[in-house]
Image (cartoon, grey):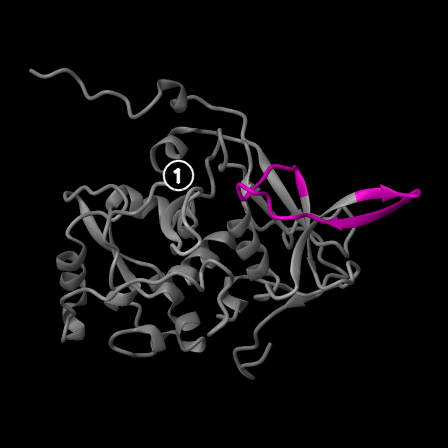
Amino acid sequence: VRPCMPAPGDRDALHSVQERRIEFRHPAYPDSAPPLLSLAAVDGERFGAGIEYSVAFAACGIVAGNRWEGAWFGQKDRIDGTDCISRVVRPVDGILRGSMYYFCIGPNTLDRYAVVQSFEHWRFPHHNLPPVWRDLAIKQPLVVPNDPDRCFSAVVCRDRSCRITGCAEACKAFRLIPPNAGEWFTSNSMDRYSRFPEPGNTDDDRNMILLRRDLHHLLDKRRCAIVPKMAAAASPLCGPTLVTHLLLPQRKRELHDLYHNRALQHPVTGIAVEALFARFAWAVMCPETFPFLTGNTDGFRVMSFDTKTKKL
């Protein structure tokens, strides 16, 4: 008889811990309003230190209707007895460590820019991904399926093991854009990124990645997402690396210690960058992370998509 399996990582990671969250606010509304986004401080030298700049920037831009050009983070200062918002320069290590930031678009911090109502109302930014995401390049696999009915088996043959853990057992092809988002998939013409274009069909190998079933569950619960990040010591000529980013620690360090900022198994091939980005947007737009519209929204500018007129 062999000894029992050791607990993963530090046993303290199994206990409840204080979870620090960083608020990103709309500058045109009072601080009594809910934050635009509330992101877990999972990046930096320790759990609770801060949040990676590019992750926060992409997330804020998404809920603002894909606004990254001219967008910036600010913090309030008091100058000559008047509150004003000063621009925050991206830190050298890329980690935002403050407790609250304002997501501003353009020079007018009083601009009441509209906020997307929900993922179902979010329009995909074709040819307009945010920084870091637009630099992400994913190679094609050596062998591609020639039959749309073989996409699931093709993903298993392509990836061979879970792309996060490297485990070969208990794995399943995971759809990046979830199957229950078929209507959104169609209205946003996402099949343009499929190998076998078909409206509403998320069962395409370019929308799938092989994951162990417990990781499948965690991503479906929006606990984490797969995002591109620049390595701290990487050359500017090197592109971003796909890593697992923890969104909802739920007062536990276990998932952070096991998976956060872990580079995906090499190689990652065949999946569409656009499908990964859509999944990130889907993961961000949940009440725990996106509380802005959970209360009284009277007077708020909200962006919604009319399925009948096909207009915002």
Question: Which residue is disc 1 drawn over?
Answer: 260
Q: Is residue 145 visible?
A: yes
User: Does residue 259 lie above or below 128 as drawn?
Assistant: above
Left or right of 256? Residue 97 is right
Which residue is at the far left? 1
* Identity, as a three-letter code, of the amino acid under mark 1: His
94 is within the stretch colored magenta: yes
| Element type where label 1 sits in the image | loop
- Which picture quadrant has residue 253? top left
Residues rendered magenta in the picture: 77-100
Q: Is residue 200 visible?
A: no
Q: Position of residue 200 (x, y in %)?
A: 34, 74
User: Does residue 45 lie above or below 121 as drawn?
Assistant: above
User: Does residue 88 lie above or below 11 as drawn?
Assistant: below
Q: Quadrant of the image for the N terminus?
A: top left
Which residue is at the far right? 81
Query: Residue drawn 68% across and 51% down?
Result: 295
Q: Position of residue 84 (x, y in %)?
A: 83, 49
- Which picture quadrant has residue 19? top right
283 is within the stretch colored magenta: no
Which residue is at the far bottom? 309
Query: Residue drawn 60% across and 76% down?
Result: 312
Q: Residues within 10 Å of mark 1 (few under 14, many from 20)?
A: many
Left or right of 52? Residue 111 is right
Query: How many discs mark residues in the rendered view?
Result: 1
Judging depth in this view, the residue of 238 and 303 nearest the camera is: 238
Q: Position of residue 46 (x, y in %)?
A: 49, 28
User: Does residue 259 lie above or below 208 as drawn?
Assistant: above
